[in-house]
Amino acid sequence: MSADHVTNASMTIEEKDGQLRQDEAEALAFVGRALLEAVGPERLVAAGEVLEALRDISLAPLSGKIEHDGHGNPLYTYGARMVWSQAHDVTEEAGHLVRTITRALAFAAATPEQRP
């Protein structure tokens, strides 16, 4: 990391943006290397497949059970709406994890000069 930090008031907006990108790249590369070391590539591929399957679960069966008002808007009540909402949160988080792990592995495989 450079001597300047993103909180340095003398940095320009462009310098701060560049520092943030560099910090993110270093963090993702660290996580990617740590994941590969902790679980190995084969288990990491399997975990990615599980997360992708979780991300891709259709919520249509739950959506059909949500009651709507007279205008087609979902009623925000407990029960079916709450079940759909919880399931949606799980699938969204799985998608986020897949993207983050993919990026982390890409950054881990790249040299600092190759990183965006």
Image (spheres, rainbow, N blue to C red):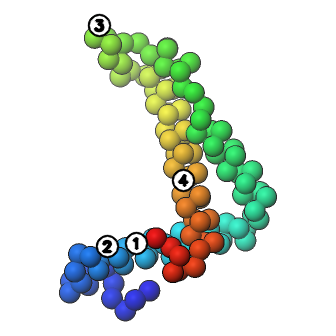
Q: Are marks 4 and 1 in contact (CB under 8 Å)?
A: no
Q: Which mark is residue 70?
A: 3
Left or right: 46, with 88 as reference point = right
Q: Residue at x 59, y 66 (%)?
A: 106
Residue type indicated by callout 4: Arg
Q: CA distance from mark 2 to mark 1?
A: 6 Å
Residue type indicated by callout 3: Gly
Q: Secondary structure at mark 2?
A: helix
Percent x, y of residue 95: 54, 45
Left or right: 6, with 24 as reference point = left
Q: Nearer the viewer, residue 43 or 21?
A: 21
Q: CA distance from mark 4 to mark 3?
A: 38 Å
Residue type indicated by callout 2: Asp
Percent x, y of residue 50: 69, 44
Q: Which residue is mark 2?
A: 17
Q: CA distance from mark 4 to mark 2?
A: 21 Å
Q: Nearer the viewer, residue 5 or 102?
A: 102
Left or right: 36, with 19 as reference point = right
Q: CA distance from mark 1 to mark 3?
A: 48 Å
Q: Earlier in the sequence, mark 3 or mark 2?
A: 2
Q: Residues within 10 Å of mark 3 (few under 14, many from 20)?
A: few
Q: Are marks 4 and 2 in contact (CB under 8 Å)?
A: no
Q: Residue at x 59, y 58 (%)?
A: 102
Q: Secondary structure at mark 3?
A: loop
Q: Which mark is residue 21?
A: 1
Percent x, y of residue 81: 44, 23
Q: Secondary structure at mark 1?
A: helix
